[in-house]
Amino acid sequence: MTRARFQGCQPEMDDNEIIKAYREKRHGTCFRLLHDRYAGKIYGKALTMLKAEAQAKDATQEIFTKIFLSLGKFEGQSKFSTWVYSVTYNYCIDLIRKEKRSRDLFADEVENPPDREIEEVDDGTLTTMKVNELRQVLRTISEADRTLLLLKYKDGMKIRDIAKLFNKNESAVKMQLKRAKEKAKRKHEELYGKKG
């Protein structure tokens, strides 16, 4: 075990070093290190999206199997964490779609084409909501809108990174985000009344 760790991967190595070492030596230690780093994050995302602990645990195992089988294809064009998130998100969305619980993430673009100018909805609308009120609002909007808002405001992802994640252009993401914020604001007003 010590010898394998020495020849393979060690905890202080970064993701890319671990992946490189895994490709060269195929030591199980390398993959275990990646598993230890990302299992909790993957489970957390799966639980947020699927809303069932057992399903999230199963999804985490399936996602790691996919990652393990695809590790040789990882090109390093994005951060490994972004790639892991993309695999996780896509797996969970596929599950949701199979269960007919969600429409396509950007389906309402077809029904409501993007405006010529995108007027920004003030982020303060979301940031000033009480935590329990915000949770309730997020429960009542679509999976697509909830995911987009969580990516932007909880995970702090930049618009360009979200666009890459979903293979969309930035203006489409901005429009979807604007609509998601508007829906959240309207839902908050319905549930809790207008503030001020």
Image (spheres, rainbow, N blue to C red):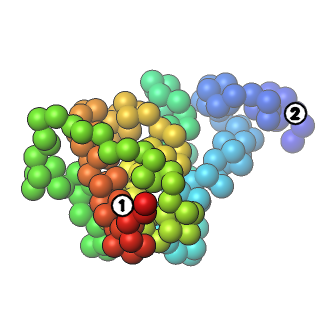
Mark-to-mark CA distance, 2 and 1: 54 Å
Q: Is residue 176 above or below residue 119?
A: below
150 to the left or right of 145: right
Q: Is residue 18 above or below residue 112?
A: above
Badge number at residue 3: 2
- Residue drawn 13% across and 41% down? 115
Which three-letter amino acid code belongs to the residue tagged 2? Arg
Where is residue 81 drawn, in percent x and y?
A: 56, 38
- Please rate how many residues cluster around mark 2, counting C-alpha atoms within 10 Å: few if below 14, some from 14 to 19, many from 20: few
Where is residue 80 drawn, in percent x and y?
A: 54, 34
Which three-letter amino acid code belongs to the residue tagged 1? Ala
Say whether residue 61 is visible: no
- Name the element at disc 2: helix
Q: Which residue is mark 1?
A: 184
- Residue drawn 32% across and 45% down? 121
24 to the left or right of 46: right
Query: Which quarter of the figure is the N terminus placed in?
Result: top right
- Name the element at disc 1: helix
Residue at the extreme right: 2
- Residue drawn 30% across and 40% down? 120
Where is residue 44 drawn, in percent x and y?
A: 59, 59
